[in-house]
Amino acid sequence: MNTLSMVNTADLLTHFEPEPVSPVPSSSGQSTGSPVTVTENGQEENTKQHKRRRVGLKRSRSGCLQCRQRRKKCHLEKPTCKSCQDRNWVCVYPSQASSNGDERQSPAARRLSSISTTAVTQSENNTVFSAAFSDDGSVDTVLFDDALLQDPLTPSTSLVPSPPMATMKSMGTRIDNLDGLDPLSILNYTRTQKELVYHFTMTISSVISYYRQEGPFRRLILSLLIPVSRPGSIAPPSTGPLLSSLCALASAHKSYALGIAQDDQQLSYHTAALEKLITLLEDLPARLEDENTQNVLLSSILILVYYEIAQGGYIDSISMHLSGAYRIITSFLNHIIFRLQTSNTTGTANSRVSKETIFLFRIFQYFDVICSLSKRDKLLDQSLQLHHFLSTYSRLRSTAPSTNDSPEDGIDPVIGLAEDLWPLIVRLCILCNDSEFGKSMTPDVMCRASLLELELSSWEVPAASSPSNPRELAMQAAAKVYQLAAQIYLLRTFFPAENVADAIQGHVRCALDHLARVCTLEGNMAALLWPVSVVASECVDSIDRGFVKVVFQKLGKRQGMANVMRGLQSVESGWRGIGDSDVVMFG
């Protein structure tokens, strides 16, 4: 029995909930709420609701899309108006056709120019978007509020609304016996560590994976952080590197997303995590037998990969971490193979692998594949040992009788409803590796590329378990974006440009509509940076490019990771004809 099944993560989460903190005043010493004035009769009046109309600016239909969406007068400076420059926003002007109200404007122009006509209502801290969808699922009007266009570097405490503790507790699985729980592993944490663990479990874990009820990262990390001793079992592995890695990530995320400067803190935790991992990896055996130890080590390194993503996604550091993670994986797989060989000799079967291990393997494979496709470089798993293991596991799982129905069935924690699409993307990556990314176009490569293109075109998004649930509909749209991005990447890599130009632009327009749907429905945007970047790199229309910039800002605000805006900079460099392969499109 693994640790996860014995620990109620919702109950354990209360140990990490930080103490209430009083509201922090602004640098001027005043509250950050709406400004108030005192009238002659002594009553307070909210001056935010009584703004004077600015004079001297003539209202024009030629204003930038940001000012038009906010229904503000635009100064009309180009390339960036004063309003956008003051707020550090992307300033996009409509084409002449859309500015003059041409009825024949393209869907791309309508996608942006109509955003000011769609209704929006505010419900507490959440924005409810209203959009009109046609029968075929395309978006006719899209709304983005001011927060969408806001600079992601601007501090915002509403980056990801955290569910209340009562809701979290109701999602947990109750357990009957907590006698094996070691309370010192919790009580020894400092208040800062508790706050950082809480930030990870309540905020970060909700934006880096897909789920319906409880995120897999939250369950896994809490179960690994709190060792459970059982009679006859080996001592639980040290969680020192995992705690340090997690605190480093949480510090970096809070620093970037919320504007809370914690550079010294995150550097200290990052250094401590590296030192502990280096020591443990030096003693790594050829066959790592203990699965819990493997999961702690692998989780620690993968969390450090997310730390590098939050810092900007620099290739050298990410490659170093992934190389260490692959050493751990191959060591454990060697042990699995040894057990299988032993079972074949003795006639006993003892080759079970926990779901937590499979989850971590899938996270690593996602990193390895996307890193290869982004850099156009070789996979770490060149022998395809992990690929074959996961493929075999997937086939065995599909043929095994289902013991219980889980609310997470049909959702891949990495890419949501695109679970059965992912093997096709892995095959795309393997094909790119085999052909040196289109440089070696043998008949075998062309045959495989044509067949893969057929399979990608035939793939259909799984039906939503709840068709009226906006989150389910958003996951469907996100899966469709992944499909279209894979098709674009395949066509661009293996087929003559003059033969596929129209097909690629058709995929781009369709993908933009689905991205608009994801944003409008406020859906989960985990792992969307790579497909968004692939689609964006093929945008040629100025309106399409302006819309994609807005999507990048939405994604950056939602994820709170610095590599998103670096990804946008890389795409913009590509638009100018300057290649930039120093960014890995994770996130």
Image (cartoon, rainbow, N blue to C red):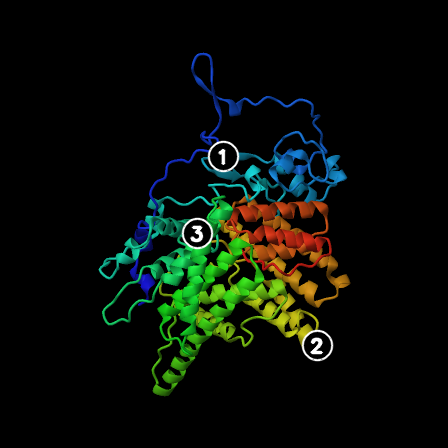
Residue at the disc numbered 3: 265
The picture places residue 553, in percent across and down from the top left corner, at 58, 46
- The N terminus, quarter of image: bottom left
- Asked if disc 3 and disc 1 are in contact, CB closer than 8 Å, the reply is no
Q: Is residue 422 visible?
A: no
Q: Is residue 461 visible?
A: yes
Q: Does label 2 or label 3 sit earlier along the sequence?
A: 3
Mark on residue 554?
none
On screen, residue 193 versus residue 386, left or right, reads: left
On screen, residue 87 above or below 558: above
On screen, residue 383 above or below 369: below
- Residue type pointed to by label 1: Gln
Q: Nearer the viewer, mark 2 or mark 3?
A: 3
Quarter of the figure with residue 538: bottom right
Residue at the disc numbered 2: 442
Residue depicted at 63% across the width and 30% down the height: 72
Residue at the disc numbered 1: 122
- Residue type pointed to by label 2: Thr
The picture places residue 158, in percent across and down from the top left corner, at 47, 41
The picture places residue 587, in percent across and down from the top left corner, at 53, 55
Helix, strand or loop at mark 3? helix
The picture places residue 247, in percent across and down from the top left corner, at 41, 54
Q: Does label 3 or label 1 sit earlier along the sequence?
A: 1
Q: 200 or 497: which is nearer to us?
A: 200
Quarter of the figure with residue 502: bottom right
Residue depicted at 72% across the width and 66% down the height: 495
Separation of marks 3 and 1 at Cα, in angstroms: 36 Å
Q: Nearer the viewer, mark 3 or mark 1?
A: 3
